[in-house]
Amino acid sequence: MSLILRFSRCIAGDFSNAKQTIADPKNFAHIRIFFRPLPFEFFQGIGFYSEQTYDYDLWSPYRQGLHRLVEQNDEIYIENYGIKDAYLYAGAGHNLDILRTLTPIVTERRYHCSMIFQPFGNGFQGRVEGNQCLIERNGRQTYLVSDVELTETTWVSLDRGMDINTDEQVWGSVHGPLRFEKRQSFADELPTQIE
């Protein structure tokens, strides 16, 4: 199996950090992350729609995105795209009828915000490219630092926003990474091979 298909089978799913929330509810909200495969024609290759939402309100995601996967030099390079009028597609992570309404015309490339994943053990390790993925929070300009570990059943991520002038952490977890377990796989929605 190609590297890109192996990675895609790992990431395709509905992930939850319920166990972490139950163990430490004061510091970790219950979050769900959906990585839903897009039709192959969308990017003329493997792509995903993603959304992150609090478990108590699955129809109001706080983050949505589109991702085009490219295999290069034994790494998976993930281009990230924003979605125009994203609220129109809320719920597409768990509702295929909504997902099917997405078209490439709604995409906006997020430059400098791509992720790079490398094989590691029985999964993959990833990080955001460079320090130019800029996000404004609380009136301060920050750059994203994102570290991820992915296996076929888990997603562990630590996202932090660092002040572009002082490198001080402005937002993100101060209690360690979020630890998700896959509730449902969407791997059967992926192609079985790529030409």
Image (cartoon, grey):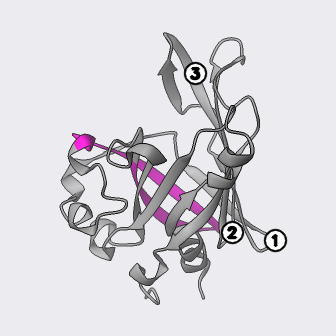
- Classify residue 22 as left or right of residue 112: right
Q: Would you say the residues marked 2 and 1 are in contact, meaning their CB atoms lie under 8 Å apart? A: yes
Query: Regarding mark 3 in the picture, which secondary structure is present there?
Result: strand
Closer to viewer: mark 2 or mark 3? 2
Magenta segment range? 65-87
Image location of residue 89, percent across then percent down:
25, 50
Label 2 to label 3, Cα distance in Å? 29 Å
Hey, what amino acid is under mark 1?
Gly
Residue position marked by numbered label 3 in the rendering: 142
- Classify residue 21 as left or right of residue 93: right
Residue position marked by numbered label 1 in the rendering: 121
Image location of residue 172, percent across then percent down:
63, 30
For residue 43, what is the image quadrant?
Answer: bottom left
For residue 144, what is the image quadrant?
Answer: top right
Hey, what amino acid is under mark 3?
Thr
- Classify residue 162 as left or right of residue 38: right
Residue position marked by numbered label 2 in the rendering: 151
Query: Regarding mark 2 in the picture, which secondary structure is present there?
Result: loop
Q: Is residue 5 visible?
A: yes
Camera-side residue: 188 or 163? 188
17 versus 168 height, above or below: below
Image location of residue 114, percent across then percent down:
53, 48
